[in-house]
Every structure is written in C-alpha cells, then in structure tokens.
Amino acid sequence: MNACEFEVLRRRNLERLFHPRSIAVVGASTDASKAGSQALLSLKGFPGRLLAVNPKADEIMGVKCYPSVAALPEGVDLAVLAIPAEHCIAAAEQAAQRGVGGIFIISGGFGETGGAGKVLQDRLAAACRRTGMRLLGPNTSGFINTHAECVASFVPGVDRLRKGSVAVIAQSGGVNLTISFLLDRLDQGVALAAGLGNAVDVTAADLLPILAADPNVSAIALHLEGVPDGRKLYDALRAVTPVKPVVVLAAGRADIGEFAVSHTGNLMGSHQRTVSALAQAGAVIVDSTEDLAQAATLLGQGRLPALRDPGVGLVTGQAGPGLLIVDGLKSAGLRVPELDGATQEVIQQHLPPMTFIKNPVDTGRPGAGFAHVVDAVAAAPEVDVVLVYALSEAAVLDPARALAAAAGRGKPLVFGTLGLQQDLAPALHDLRGAAIPAVLGPERLVLAATALAADARGRWLGTQRAETTVSRSQVPLQGPYDEHKAKALLAEYGVRSPQRTLCHGRAEALAAFQRSAGAVVVKIVADDVPHKTEAGGVHLNIRTPGEMEAALDAIARIPTGDPGKVLVEEMAPAGVELIIGAVRDPSWGVTVVVGLGGVLAEALSDSSVRLAPLADADIDDMLNQLRGRQLLDGFRHLPVCDRTAIVEVVQAVARLMQEHADIAELEINPLRVNAQGALALDALVVLEKDAA
Amino acid sequence: MNACEFEVLRRRNLERLFHPRSIAVVGASTDASKAGSQALLSLKGFPGRLLAVNPKADEIMGVKCYPSVAALPEGVDLAVLAIPAEHCIAAAEQAAQRGVGGIFIISGGFGETGGAGKVLQDRLAAACRRTGMRLLGPNTSGFINTHAECVASFVPGVDRLRKGSVAVIAQSGGVNLTISFLLDRLDQGVALAAGLGNAVDVTAADLLPILAADPNVSAIALHLEGVPDGRKLYDALRAVTPVKPVVVLAAGRADIGEFAVSHTGNLMGSHQRTVSALAQAGAVIVDSTEDLAQAATLLGQGRLPALRDPGVGLVTGQAGPGLLIVDGLKSAGLRVPELDGATQEVIQQHLPPMTFIKNPVDTGRPGAGFAHVVDAVAAAPEVDVVLVYALSEAAVLDPARALAAAAGRGKPLVFGTLGLQQDLAPALHDLRGAAIPAVLGPERLVLAATALAADARGRWLGTQRAETTVSRSQVPLQGPYDEHKAKALLAEYGVRSPQRTLCHGRAEALAAFQRSAGAVVVKIVADDVPHKTEAGGVHLNIRTPGEMEAALDAIARIPTGDPGKVLVEEMAPAGVELIIGAVRDPSWGVTVVVGLGGVLAEALSDSSVRLAPLADADIDDMLNQLRGRQLLDGFRHLPVCDRTAIVEVVQAVARLMQEHADIAELEINPLRVNAQGALALDALVVLEKDAA
C-alpha cells in the first residue's frame, strides 16, 4: 500500500469509527458501576450490529459475547475498549488484525500521568500509525452520533440528547457534555458530539473534513486545550470554514499549566498565537461554553456572505435594552451605520414623531407598523445583519408574523426577546417554525452580530490570501548573522535601513563620520555581543569628533573575540517604532509578530500574531488589532505612518522565513516608521543551526 | 417646616410611593390600548384602596372614578398619571395639594425630547422641590412591589413576576423588565423592580436607603445610564453596601451619546469614572443584564466577610470544565491558593492516586468520597469561597446531600452543574431547599466567585477609609499659578520637586547654571505660555555654557506678555513617569486620576480614577489597575518604584483639592518615580476663577 492509499484507508477508518454499522464493547460487564456496563447500556438503541467481548460470559444484556478481541468476527467498524490501560495495547493490536476500523479507549492512565503511561500511549500511537486503524482517546467519555443513533459514551443521560445540526468536538469529555447540554437548553440538538481526550490519533484536524462533508451538520463547535499540531489544524480549518461555520473556545487565557498537563497531557502553548491563528483560518473565537453553544447555534441557522465589515441594523421596541445592545455592538467594534434618508422616510411613516430612527430604530412599544419598520431596515443597502429586540407582549406583537417579510430578504435576522417562560414559549415555537433565529436578552443579540460578523470577516480575509507556491531556496545561508549581514539580507527583500558603513578599525570609523552629513549612530559589530545596547555598544546622536572618539573608546572596552568592527550609520528621522518578528513554531510553522516598540508595549504584550503566508489585509488586521494602534494614525505630535511600507516589511519578513527554511528566527527591532516609509534600525537573523 | 423636617417628609413620601396603601389611576380608561386601562388592570390584585380619575365615568372596572385629581380624597399615597405630558403639570400640582405622597408619570415627551418637553420637566421638578411630593419618572413603565402586591406598571405579564428578594432599580423601564425576566429564568423573583425613566425627582440614590432597610430585600441590581448626581449616588452606595450587596450595570462603554440622550435625556459621562466610583463605593460591576441578574441572585444568597483577596477553592468532577473554571478565575485575577499538605492528605484518602488535588481538586467522576473531599476543601483555612462543578449524574451524585456538610462550614459555597433539564430539576429543587446556590455551566461559577470577591474587596476597602473631616481653607488662593508657584504649593503638602531657581533675566539664569552641580533643565515661566514644551520653552540636559546660551536664546524668542523669567532646575534621576491629576467633577466632586506617562499610555487611556477622600489602599488599588503596572515593579531595566512615595503624592493632591475649594484642576505631569522616591517634574494648578 503506498502512502496515498494508506491515507485513504485512514480516512475511511475514521468514517467507520464515527458512523459505525457494527460495534463491539470490549470489557462488557453486568456490574452497573463499570464503564463496560454503561457503554453497553448507552448503545442499546444502536440500530446496527452490537457485539461484546468478555471471556467469562456468553451474552450480556442480550448481546453475544466473544472471549477476546482476537475472536471477534472480521471487520467490526468500532471497538469500544472499556478495559484498564495496561490491557489496551494487546486489545488494540488484536483489533487492528481483525480489521476493526477504529477503537475508542475510555481509560485514563496514559500520557496524562507521564512515565509508564506515556510509554503505553506511544505504543498505541505507533500501532495506529502502522496499521491505519483509528483511535479516539484514550482518556475520554466518547462520542454521540445522534443521526446514526450511536451513543458511544459511558455517561448516563447522553442517549437522550436530541438530534440536531451542531457538531461538537471537545478536547475534554466533560466539556463535550457541558456544551451538548448547553445546546439542549437552547432547544438545539447535536449532530455529533465527541470528546477527544488525549487525542493520540484522532484530532480536531482529522474530524473537521468529515464534519464539513456531513449533510447533518450545519455548524461546528470546537473546544481546544493544547494544540500540538497547529499547522495541520490551521489548514483543516481554512478548508472547512468557507463551507461551514466553526466556533472555537480555547482554554489557556491564564496560566493553568500544571493542572492542564495533568488533564490530557497537553502543553497549552501561547493562547494569543492559538486564537490568532484559528481566527486567521476563519474560525469565530469565543470565551465561554455558553457563547460557544449560542454562536454555533446561530451560525448554523444562517451566515453572512464573506464581508470585511458588515453593517448592523437594529430595531428595538424598548429604548433601554436597545442602548445596551448598541453599546455592546460598538464596544465589539461592529459598525452600526446611519440609515440613509430614503429608509428613514419610510420608517417615519410608521412611527410617531420624536423617536430615534437613524439606527438603532427605537419604535417604542411595538405597534401596527413594527413589521414595516423591520422590513425597511432589512431592505436598507447599508444593513447586512438585522437585529430586533422586543420584550414579550403577545397582545401587540406576534414576532414570527412581524418579522416574516424582513426575514424573506435573505439577510441574517436575529430576534432578541425576554418574558415569562410561559408567555414566550408560543412565540419561540412559531419563530422556530418560521426558521427565524431567536435569542434571550440583549447581550445575546450582540453575540449574534459579533459571531456573524467575525465569520463573514474571516472568510473575506481568506479570499484575500493568494495561494502562491513558495520557492524554497536550495542554497543554505551562511551564518552567523551580525547586524550588518542581517540588514543586507533584508535589503535583498526590499527592507530599507539607514545609510551605513561597516568600518574595520578606528581610522575607517572616523573617516566614515567625517563623510556623514549629519548626526550618526555608532554600533559595535560582533557576533558574540548580541545585546549591543546593554553592553554599551550603541551610541546615538554623535555630532562632534570628540563625541565620536568617546563612543569608539567605549566600544573598544567591550570584551569580544572579534574586536575593531563598528557600524557608522545615519541617524534615522523621527517616527513611531514597531517590532517585526518571525519564528518557526514547532506546532504552527512560520509565525509572524507585529508589535509596538517601547517598554510599555512590551509590558502589555501589545502585539499581534499571524501565520505565514499572509494577505496584505491580514497585516492591516494585525495593525488594527494593536491596542496602541492610534499611534500609527497621527496621534498627538506623531506622524501618520505609512501603512503600506509596514505591510511591505512584514511581507518581506514572512517571505524570507518561507524561502529560507534554515532561518529559525528573524527580528527587526525597531522598525522606525513615519509618513515617508519604514526603516529597519536594527535586525537579527538566527539560523536553525545557530539556535541553541 | 425647616429643611430637616422637609427631608423627613420627602423620605416618608418616597416610602408611600413604593409601599402605597392607596393608589389613584389618573386617566383610567376602558380602552384596552390605553396605558390607563393597562395600569388599572395590572393593579387588580392590589390589596389596598384603589381609585380612578376620569371626568367621563363614575366607575371603571369596578373602581370608583373621580372627575379630577383635585376631587380625590385627601392623602392618597400614590397617583399613577396615565395622561399626556401636557396635562401632567396641572395634575401634579393638584395631587400635591391633596396630600398625595408620590406620583408616577408614564408618558414621555419631557426632557428626552428637548425644547418644550424640557420646560415641562423643569416645572415638574420644581413642583416636587416645593411641595415634597415625590415623582417617579416621567417616561417609565413604573414599578412592581411584589411583597405589597402592588403592580404599578402598564406592561402586561409583570403581575405574574414571582415574589423574591432581589430589588431591581433600572434607569430604563425596558431594562427593568429585562432584568426581572432574567431573574425569573433563574427561578428568582423580585422584591421591588422600578424603572426610573427620566429620574427627575426619584433617583437610584433615593431608593438605595429604602431598599437597605427593607427586610424583603437581600440584594440590589442597579442599571444606570447617565449619572447626573454622582457624589450623592456614591455616598448612598457607601452607606448601603456594608449592609446589602449592590450589583451595577452601567451603559456607556462605547460612545452611544446621541441615542442615549434621545432615551432619557441623560448625558452618559465618562464610563471609566462611573464604574470606578461605584466600585470604590463597594458595588460589584458587571457588563451584562445576564451577569447582573446572576450575580445579584448569588450575592443575595450569601456574602463573604470584608476581605482584601479571598482564596477560591474548586472541586470538580470533570477535569475539562475544571480547567475552564480555573482559567476564568485566574484571568479575572482571583487567587486559587494551593491547598496545604494536611488538607491534601485528607483529600488523598478519598480519591484514587494520580488525580490533581492541589486546587483545583479533580475528583474524576464523583464517587463515594465526593462529600468528604468538598468538606475538606471547605475546611481549608486558605479557602474562603468553595466552588463545586459536576455534571448531572443522579446515579452517583446527590448534590444537596453531598454538599450539606461543606455548606455548614459558613463559607460561601456555589455548585455549578449542567444536564438535561428533566434530569437536573430534582437536584436543583433539593439544592434550593438546602439553601445551596446553584448555577448552570462553568462560566457562571467564575462569575459567582468574581462577584463574591469583588463584593468582599469593596467592603474591605471601605473599612480602610478613615472618615476624616476636611478643614476647608478659608483663605482664597492667589492665581494664576505658573509652574514655580504650583510646585511651591505642592511642596507645602509634601510633594518634592528637583532643586530649582526662578531667574529673572539672562544673568540670573547663567549664574544659576554656573552654581549647578550637573546638567540642568531650563524652562520658560509665563502664565500665558501653558504648553511650554510645544512652544519650545523646555530645554533638557543642558551641560555647557554654549548650550545654556542657546536655550535662553530660544526661550527669548517665544512671544509672551511677561518675558524674561526662566526656571533653572536640576535634571532629575531616571525613573518611571506617572501622571497624577485631579478635577472637581460637576457630578462626582473631587476626582483623582493616576496614569502612566508616555504617548502609548495616553493612547490606551491607561489610567485609574477614584473619588477623594482616598484610603492608601485605594491608591494601591489604582496602581494595580494600570495595565502597565509591571513598569512600577522593576520591569526590564526599570527601577522598582517607591510605591509609598506615589501614595503620598496622590494623597497630597487629593487633600489640596479638598482643602482648597477654589482649585478647579491640578496636575503633576510627569511625576518621576524610582526606588528613591517621587519628584514632580512639572505641575499645573488651575483655579476655578481662571478656568474658562
């Protein structure tokens, strides 16, 4: 079997695991406290063929028992291993020999415990890599495929989760259930809900293409802890998000390292890098399981087209909640455009004077004209998403009827409401019938618009990224790189630096100073002095021969194995300082960072991260994401910075990293930017072989 | 009647308004579409005396009608005015004459519309101020007092809101109902729920003391738009929060000015100032109606004692949700202390090996020892709040029973769970019976801990503030203040500046330079040059006579009506720069600001605000709230700053503003701080009479 055929086998086995026609429960038991009993119970509604493995019984709960995995008939799709960790290796190897498509291991005691458990886990991984059999877990509560009526999970109650169209993939079994139950509370069922556990073989990246192709799935809710295979996940998401919306909750905003490792054995990695990369791939990022369930439900009911910056229109029957909604929309950076005159005129006909109709439209208590007002807002060309808020008041508003015309205009429309549960129920029922999404409370409307806009924006950014093939340089770079060489390499990619002269010895340096038109900077050049400033090797604003002599004296005192070299460089004009960096991350590949310069920016980590290759629009997005972004746009006495020049430098850095696989790390710090362009004032290139 | 007696009357009338024994509906109607019909319908369950005013009927819905307000019997407690704005003035004046305690005006068309409406509103306000009669509204849907069975509101359905212990005060009638319905969804009723509308007379500050004294109220949920009477609200909150918890949602995070004014006619003011001041007064600040309802419900069920930094203990039956909870707690800055060895030993006896027990305690699927584990955590001295998370699994966990022992330890304990609604219902019912608060989902547990900690911390800060009487200076200050005078004034309050000489003319300046030990700063001193740096009037780091001459030349070229004065000042040692400012805010009184210096800090508005007088602990809190706070604690090459010196400067600024009522504004920019202390490098004092 060649590599391609093997991949096809693995993919088919993955399909068999999650859509099985036959399932064997290994470790089936009559003891209700055992997982092997729960697993069998949960599968009692499974319409396919059910088998059990237990050497001490002929049948359990009416299911035929086989004495061992090796004794199972050929070609069972899924084997659920409800047995202790130490027995799993043998069972897994036997399963592979019997042509089982996939196994799912409930037990913990693997990688998350370190030591011997890690060895067991590595052996499981090796068995999968060798045979093509797939493995869910270990250390997970399993999965539910409602459409296949397959409850491969040992948690009681999950067999009653209703059929729905949101797929859940969670690192943790407990979070998988948490999300599934929250979906249930939103009157939304699940299509597939899987807990990945230690994710030794089957990862989120594997499942995404299957879910993208599954007609029962309209949206995907994804929960992540660590991401050891970032680039694979990124690529999978980029392929899926144009087809189906994906909402992600990534743990690890704070430092929760020790407890996290104890859970599924995964290191958390940088949260900023994770969420930036996933958003770049078109995922919608949220911060809570509640928002995950709500956003996935809404996006599953309808998406915007790919759009950079959709306009939100709001009609509210109560001004106070309307104010909270607009406050939330604007705080989230969403655009609430003023309605044009023609739309306002139409609306005016249906409302009393003195109401606010520019957007939001405050109707006051909904009256007869409410439907017309909502329809007029939905028809407005500047509006891409329509939000409507009205408290339950059956006597004056039948929402399904009032929103029908507007909903027919093909733009996402979400209704927000609240009331006593019994009063709301009929309206919510009718809205479901009319396929109009409804949420409870003002903030959920804000979440709806935020999720719709993020989803649309992510796809728009995706359309901006040209799929160019990078031509890898075949000639290895010759390091190590000092500042002079690093700037020369950057110059080949179009990155400018101030005019400089590399001088060997004092006489050359003094001559270079004499030739210079104005003030200069004098810097030591020595491979073994990486922190030039701290070492006293950088002297700014040298104007007189006396200052030049003093600077050279100071540099001469710095211990180095390669003395005598200095750079004499023109002083750069004033401007704003940025840091542009790139690394080759073991999980995510080439990762580019843009940050503001200065110690406060460093303390705040005011930087933005993306994976290469980048669209120019991605870089613009990075700059807009900086908390201090105002500094680029002419704040106080600062210049309006040349954003095009910044974009070019970032693209050059990304291209350098992609074309030269031997560069481990690259940094321009600072990049001095003003209205005239951008200059690299210092640069660092570290080759893989020089990186310790 | 003297002023004191008049205040007693107003307070008694406010009680009559919200706890009426007799109510007259003015504008009572048989037309179901009219508010006067709805109001009468809503009051049908009112156990007190109900009257109506309608010149065209003798009785409506069985309620006796009077032809006019003037014809009403003496001493009705509450008159509900369901009549157009233009008729309200006459009705209000007649009501006051008939000894009505308070009125409530449904109609809009007052201040929120500007112009004539504003005139009407001012006349209403004047009538209240003259007579002592109280006014709720205008432009509100009214209030519900469930314990008095008084539904003074024109919104159908609110008469079925259940009786509870959370009081709601909302600026907006629509938000009042939104919050009340959210409380209902949490199985929590309301005690009193009032929409203030334009709040011409009755404000939140008026209602707070009444709610503090009401035995039916256990917690207060407050929604604010603008706050025109900030200091009054601050003082009311400071008095209430030691007695009852107050949770606040303040609109206006983003710029929503125009729409906000159209709503209740209030300007929003600075959101940062509002929430900082309310938190300083002990209120718990939230960002959504959902969190408002949830936090008020939880705090009404139990509070922590006043504590600076409570420790949170977490027991979780599922690791994944536990990870999300710890992530949320740490992101919110809460302390999750490691359990001491003795506690861990106790826990270890009840759990299998290899589980994480340091805090959080990850029990795995709850088993027989769960109750003991939770109790051990509750008993741990480092734990002040106990959180427990477990998915619904009736077969293995009866939460009310398992948590009983731990709940008996007198520390707040909150249980978080999720499951199918029908599975959860019995457990939630039992927990309510056992008075153990329960929330749905991991993030709600984080909210619970955050709210409990904020409430405890707010009260702790309150205990740190000594109630000192400020002795107002009787001698007016003589302005205007140039830098030299401003620094001299600050020096009287202990604020240090670098050694300086005020020089008249070039010769004095040169002599001062000659006497100086090191480098100096030369600055213009002229009342009419406020922006010295921008004008070229500040020359740093002058080391040679030539530089000194050049600096004086440059200063001599600046146009001023008062030429020839310069300050020659020692260069200050390096350090971190802060900005310390204070203003006399029309709503909030003396407000102190501490911010980091530099253009990025300015762009980020990285500053912190409090009202004077301040405890030293308040100032410490301000510094900790700065996003760039790391810069004060020895970040990179920066010194560890002398926080005590900063606290002393801020206290001096606050005291100066309080003792000298004629200072409008005061600013030290920058305050240079290092390990040795703090120096004011520049200072500005603006007197009220000089402030344009």
Image: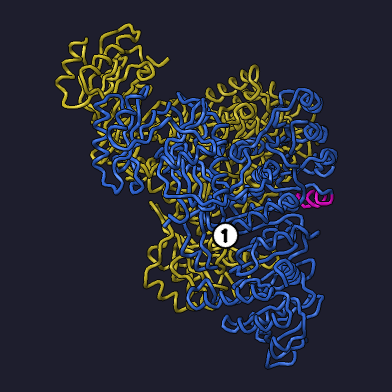
Chain colours: A blue, B yellow
Specify the quadrant that holds the N terminus of chain A. Answer: bottom right
Front position in the image: A571 or B622: A571
Specify the quadrant that holds the C terminus of chain A. Answer: bottom left
Front position in the image: A83 or A134: A134
Q: Is residue A607 above or below residue B403?
A: above
Front position in the image: A453 or B488: A453
- Residue B293 in view, yes or no: no
Pointer 1 residue: A227
Judged left or right of residue A448, residue B578 is: left
Name the residue at the left extreme. Answer: B515
Q: Secondary structure at mark 1?
A: loop
Judged left or right of residue B389, residue B69 is: right
Characterize the magenta stretch by its predominant secondary structure.
Answer: helix
Residue B158 in picture, x, y percent from top left: 70, 45
Residue B126 in picture, x, y percent from top left: 55, 21
Judged left or right of residue A465, residue A474 is: left
Residue A178 in picture, x, y percent from top left: 63, 62
Quarter where residue B225 is shown: top right
Q: Is residue A332 above or below residue A274?
A: above
Name the residue at the top extreme. Answer: B561
Residue B321 in picture, x, y percent from top left: 57, 62
- Residue B644 in view, yes or no: yes
Q: Is residue B232 above or below residue A73?
A: above
Q: Is residue A428 covered in magenta?
A: yes
Image: magenta residue range: A423-433
Q: Which residue: 28% across, 11% down?
A: B553
User: Residue type at mark 1?
Assistant: Val
